[in-house]
Image (tube, grey):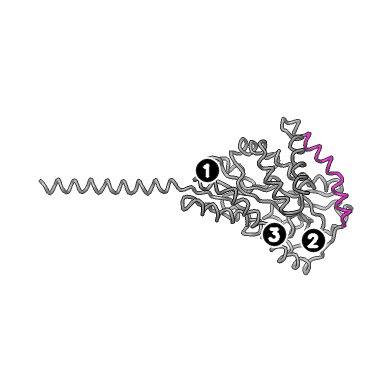
Amino acid sequence: MAKSIFKSTMIVATATFVALSFGAASTAQAAKSVWNFNMWGGKRAFTAGIESIKVDLEKAGGGDFELKINYGDALGPNRQNPENIKVGAFEAGQNCVGYYPNKMPLLSVMELPFLAPRDLQQRANVEMEVLKHPAIIDELATRWNAKFFGPAFLPAYEFMGNKRIETTADMKGVKMRISGLNAQALQVFGAVPTMVTAPDGYNALDRGTIDSFGFPYSYAFGAYKLYEVSKYVTEGLGMNGFMCLQTVNIDAWNASPQAVKDALPAAQTKAIAAMIDAYIEADKKWIPLFHEKLEVVKIDPSVRAELAAGASKIYMEWAKEQDDKGRPGTEMLNYVKSVVAKYSK
């Protein structure tokens, strides 16, 4: 009888220990915050920022936080990133406003032609300040249950492809890949803007569905190997392009360790520096190669000025469209102009 009681007691004690152990392990596992991040393309200068943030936030989390970068659209098509982040299909991802027409209408102000600075640090400074504007914060939160967390600024755009472009007259009838608002500046001169995602650029040029591809110079042309299927590249257009940013699902953000939240501002600053360094290194690698393999068409400043001459009209049309839809378009445009002036001194 004593042995039976002892045996029963041991079984209960063992079961209790196992249950408590598994419970503790489960609790510990549940306490860890994991963000799955969706990124199109592979590692390149553009991804240096998120890669830097990953290191800093995971260090701050002390084992309680992990940021998994999934390259090559592994978690879903890039054009669905806002929707997938909104519903929590994955926690975070890369966004470029031009890929999502009318989905981030106020933030599209940053894609107006010739508005943002060409200097990388100035551009980063402007974007970081604009992303703190209450109307932009509300747009991301209300529409997409998301908040900005990582900078993803881009160098100025040039064109690479199989049509030689030196003057505005050369643009007539040319199928040119550029984002919507910038496209308006080219349409004035007869260009035919066509939206193609970055990963589709190589095949589009190779098959002739695009004549000339607008991309951040120089890293993007090299990263996606567009020089392999092109004859010409411009230098000197320096057009504005996509407004890009990294966002995270608000619920995932709220569930993250406080130490991670506290570490984010410093991580963003380091990410900006990492991206600038990566872009500079990319120029050292790719520009000599382009000069060797392609005809480099130097664009006279007067041509850029001719393109930019109609920008004010495009700005006013954008602001009116936003105002007519009940959004603070004029206010946002004036605000961004003031921020650009502040950092362009």
- Disc ID at residue 111: none
Secondary element type, mark 2: strand
Q: Which residues are magenta?
A: 300-320
Distance from the alpha carbon under mark 1 to that under mark 2: 42 Å
**What residue is drawn where x is 60% and y is 48%?**
265
The percent coordinates of residue 88 (x first, y second) are 54, 42
Residue that numbered label 2 is attached to: 233
Secondary element type, mark 3: helix
Up/down of 91 relative to 233, above or below? above
Tell me the crowding category of disc 3: few under 14, some 14 to 19, or many 20 or more residues within 10 angstroms, Cα based: many
One can see residue 90 in this view: no
Residue that numbered label 1 is attached to: 252
**What residue is drawn where x is 77% and y is 68%?**
293
Viewer-side residue, 154 vs 161: 154
Residue that numbered label 3 is attached to: 279
The percent coordinates of residue 320 (x first, y second) are 79, 34
Is the residue under label 2 in contact with that under label 3 (CB below 8 Å)? Answer: no
Within the image, what quadrant is residue 291 found in? bottom right
